[in-house]
Image (spheres, grey):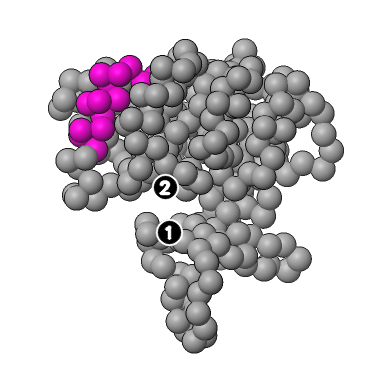
Amino acid sequence: MSKLLVKVDKRENIDEVLKLDIGGIILSYDDLAVASNFYVNMDDIKEIRKKTDKIIVVSLNKMMHNKDLAKLEEVLIELDRIKVDMVLFYDVAIIEIKKKLGLDIPLIISQEHLNTSINSNEFYFKQGVDGSLISSDITKEELLEIRKKTDKIIMFTGYGYLPIFYSRRYLITNYFAYIKKEKQGDCYFIRNNDDFYSITQDEYGTIIYTKEPVNLVNELDDLDDIDYIVIDGFKASDLVDVIKNFIKKKKMNGLYQGFFHTKSIYKVKK
């Protein structure tokens, strides 16, 4: 049966979330992660580790640069020492650092739009990766087929706003410079017909998200073989209620489910 992993939306909600019937939480590490409402340091993680025996997953999901490598090694060594349960990562440099340093900490690859097939995941498993947060760009049938072909850890996002576009450029800043107006914040909306998509900018670039959060609460019975269902609290306004609905498997109408039941079919034009 799947366990729930929650990416907490606010620092002050950590204790409340840990009291719920979930498997554990995901925390984003300062300067080594992106797309989070807040970030933690090593002291924060140690304090949380003292409070709970639930799973603690640390996200290091930033595309790393040379200047990040020294800190990255230090953080991985310490996370390994204090027995953090898993690390979510994007940059494959982390695989090599783990090998070089002889660390035991389990690694879960998380690359949003990549690793959408049996073979791509199997490639990383052969490099010593312990599991995969499977892209939400595939259907239920494709997800379950990946599950059948491996005994590694498989995660899938059950709730959350999903990134659909990323640029290292500061697109919001550039836009306001072009129209000669002052930028008032780092989150805006792009309108496409009658839909609005949030666009956010931070020091690492610009991301556009789905118009609403994917919500697979109605699909949980079919996902029992998935090890962990992720509830992503980024930009969520009612995270605790969302978690309770997932715990109760509350059936709901009108939910956005992304590609879960819709294949993406691309054809080359003649």
Please give the name of the residue rendered at 50% of the width and 79% of the height, measured from the top-left corner.
182
The residue range painted magenta reads 72-86
Is residue 80 rendered magenta in the image? yes
For disc 2, the marked residue is: 34
Residue 10 in picture, x, y percent from top left: 55, 40
In the displayed orientation, state which residue is furthest to the bottom: 180
Residue 39 in picture, x, y percent from top left: 42, 42
Please give the name of the residue rendered at 77% of the width and 41% of the height, measured from the top-left corner.
255
User: In this picture, is 91 found above or below 193?
Assistant: above
- Quadrant in which residue 189 is drawn: bottom right
* Mark 1 Cα shell of 10 Å, populated few (<14), some (14-19), many (≥20): some
For disc 1, the marked residue is: 202
Q: As shown in the figure, which amino acid type bears the numbered disc 2? A: Val
Q: In this rendering, does residue 112 appear at all?
A: yes
Please give the name of the residue rendered at 79% of the width and 26% of the height, measured from the top-left corner.
250
Residue 167 in picture, x, y percent from top left: 42, 61
User: In this picture, is 165 found above or below 169?
Assistant: above
User: How far apart are labels 1 and 2 at the CA level?
Assistant: 9 Å
Looking at marks 1 and 2 on the same chain, the residue that comes earlier in the sequence is marked by 2
Q: As shown in the figure, which amino acid type bears the numbered disc 1? A: Asp
Q: In this rendering, does residue 268 appear at all?
A: no
Q: Secondary structure at mark 2?
A: loop
Please give the name of the residue rendered at 47% of the width and 13% of the height, measured from the top-left corner.
53
